[in-house]
Image (tube, grey):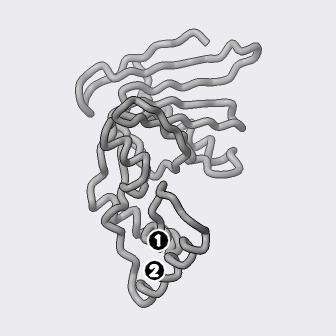
Amino acid sequence: MTTDPFALFESWFAEARETEPNDSNAVALATADGNGRPAVRMVLLKGHGPDGFVFYTNQQSRKADDLSANAQAALLFHWKSLRRQIRIEGNVAPVTDAEADAYFATRGRDSQLGAWASDQSRPLDARATFEARFAEMEARFASVDVPRPPHWSGYRVSPLRIEFWQDREHRLHERRLFERSGSGAIGGWSEGLLYP
């Protein structure tokens, strides 16, 4: 019987939350633009389950531009304290407005204001320019809740492949690979091993 990869992810992720000193939900996100030029950066996982893995960003950022041109991505969790990695590859789609609104409402006020003040990934002439824009947003929203900016939302990576990598002595690592064996979100999973 095949192991449920999402239950295994949750088990490993729970351990990481206990052992990692900082940002156990930090994950490397790899994208490629329309010409196939790759880029990778760290983002924070903000939701997960059988429908996929969710992160949020400015939709005018380079990662959003890449995903608009090529709606596929790879994620890599590396938990050094546990000597484990999880690699995820899949298709990407935007979250709903309701999901984005609900998550944005949980962010700290300064983070909400920063989402309005930042032209993420665009050239910045001086730090003072950004700080001035932040101060403008503080004044603009001084007496009201900060709404989600129209250019800020989330993405869900719906996995097609998930690999669980466990470090072993002498580089005799254990690698378990799960691949979606059906179509869409209702497809099942096949499970196998990879040579280290």
Residue 121 appears left or right of 153: right
- Determine whether label 2 and label 1 are within 8 Å by CB: yes
Q: Residue at the spot x=51%, y=29% of the render? A: 87
Residue 172 appears left or right of 38: right
Q: What x and y, as percent, mark residue 15?
A: 62, 41
Mark with earlier residue (2, 1): 1
Q: Type of residue at label 1?
A: Ala
Q: Residue furthest right?
A: 170
Q: Type of residue at label 2?
A: Met
Residue corresponding to mark 2? 137
Q: Residue at the spot x=41%, y=28% of the render? A: 4
Res 68 seen here: yes
Compared with 173, 133 (above or below) is below
Tell me which corner region of the image, top left, top right, bottom left or bottom right, holds residue 93: top left
**Residue 173: which numbered mark, if any?**
none
Residue 167 appears left or right of 63: right
Res 10 seen here: no
Quadrant in which the C terminus appears: top right
Q: Residue at the spot x=49%, y=40% of the render? A: 29
Q: What x and y, as percent, mark residue 126?
A: 60, 68
Compared with 98, 165 (above or below) is above
Q: What x and y, as percent, mark residue 82?
A: 68, 34
- Secondary structure at numbered mark 2: helix
Q: Nearer the viewer, residue 118 or 112?
A: 118
Residue corresponding to mark 1? 117
Q: Residue furthest top?
A: 195
- Crowding at dot 2, Cα within 10 Å, few <14 / some 14-19 / many 20+, comes out as some
Quadrant in which the N terminus appears: top left
Tell me which corner region of the image, top left, top right, bottom left or bottom right, holds residue 146: bottom left
